Image (cartoon, rainbow, N blue to C red):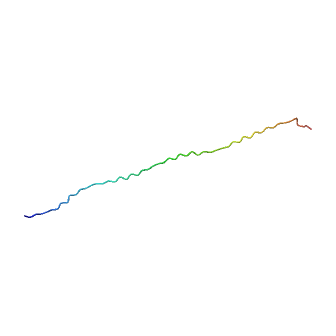
Amino acid sequence: QTHTFSKTIVPHIHPQHVTNVHHKHFQHVHQYPHTYSSYDPVTHSHTHCGKPCCN
């Protein structure tokens, strides 16, 4: 009896794929600046007591 052996390479292809996902996030910051103002009204009054003197 004789035994013979042979070797056969059977390729197994396993394709791979990488998807790069870049996430962007926009954070909206709402600001409400507040200003103050002042208003100081001034009034004047003139009162005449008696008559002016005429020369």
Task: Name the spot of residue 40 as percent of width and height, x first.
Answer: 71, 42
- Residue lying at the far bottom in this picture: please name it: 2
Quadrant including the N terminus: bottom left
The part of the image, by quadrant, that contains residue 42 is top right
Task: Name the spot of residue 2 as percent of width and height, x first.
Answer: 8, 64
Please give left or right for residue 50 compared with residue 35 in the image.
Answer: right
- Residue lying at the far front in this picture: please name it: 1
- Residue lying at the far right in this picture: please name it: 55
- Residue lying at the far top in this picture: please name it: 50
Up-down: is 17 above or below 32? below
Please give left or right for residue 35 compared with residue 27 in the image.
Answer: right
Please give left or right for residue 9 compared with residue 16 in the image.
Answer: left
Task: Name the spot of residue 23 as percent of width and height, x first.
Answer: 42, 50
Quadrant including the C terminus: top right
Tell me how many marks there are: 0
Q: Nearer the viewer, residue 35 or 54?
A: 35
The part of the image, by quadrant, that contains residue 43 is top right
Q: Nearer the viewer, residue 33 or 54?
A: 33
